[in-house]
Image (cartoon, rainbow, N blue to C red):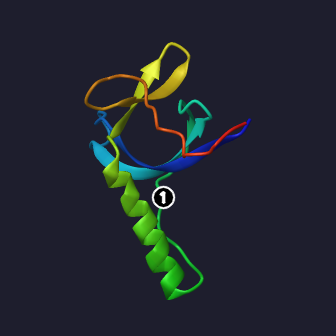
């Protein structure tokens, strides 16, 4: 299924063993903008040259332009929700994206 992805800040609540934390992750969406998946580990900038590393670091910063998401346990696994509203995570599909 076609879709798109972007970087998002994801908040994980504290557990009895770990402190709460914020981390940038890659989040995947379907064509309607609903989250379908996200990276298990946080994203880190990389590149084969210093300029590529700088460019990737700038792309990571785009996560701060979008609402923070939170991992929520649901009846059938986990989902991402908007940390402020509790509504399902969503992103506007890029202009011109079609099936």
Q: Quick check: 53 above or below 33? A: below
Crowdedness of circle 1 by 10 Å Cα count: few (<14), some, many (20+)?
some
State the residue at coordinates (36%, 22%). 87
Give the residue number, with chain letter if any, for mark 1: 43
Q: Quadrant of the C terminus?
A: top right
State the residue at coordinates (28%, 25%). 85
Q: Is residue 91 left or right of residue 83?
A: right
Residue 48 coordinates in the image, percent (x, y): 60, 82
Q: Is residue 11 left or right of residue 6?
A: left
Q: Is residue 47 left or right of residue 18?
A: right
Number of marks present in the image shown: 1
Residue lying furthest front: 96
Q: Quick check: 87 above or below 50? A: above
State the residue at coordinates (32%, 48%). 22
Q: Quick check: 56 above or below 96? A: below
State the residue at coordinates (42%, 70%). 57
Q: Nearer the viewer, residue 21 or 98?
A: 98
Q: Secondary structure at mark 1?
A: loop
Residue 84 coordinates in the image, percent (x, y): 25, 30
Residue 81 coordinates in the image, percent (x, y): 39, 28
Q: Quadrant of the N terminus?
A: top right
Q: Quadrant of residue 28?
A: top right
Residue 86 coordinates in the image, percent (x, y): 32, 23
Residue lying furthest top: 75
């Amino acid at each position: 299924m076609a879709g798109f992805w972007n970087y998002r800040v994801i908040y994980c609540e504290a557990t009895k063993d770990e402190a709460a934390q914020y981390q940038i992750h890659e989040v995947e969406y379907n064509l309607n903008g609903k989250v379908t998946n996200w990276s298990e580990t946080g994203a880190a900038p990389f590149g084969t040259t210093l300029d590529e590393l700088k460019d990737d670091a700038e792309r990571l910063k785009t996560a701060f332009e979008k609402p923070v998401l939170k991992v929520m346990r649901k009846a059938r696994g986990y989902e991402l929700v908007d940390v402020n509203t509790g509504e399902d995570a969503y992103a506007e599909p890029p202009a011109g994206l079609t099936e």
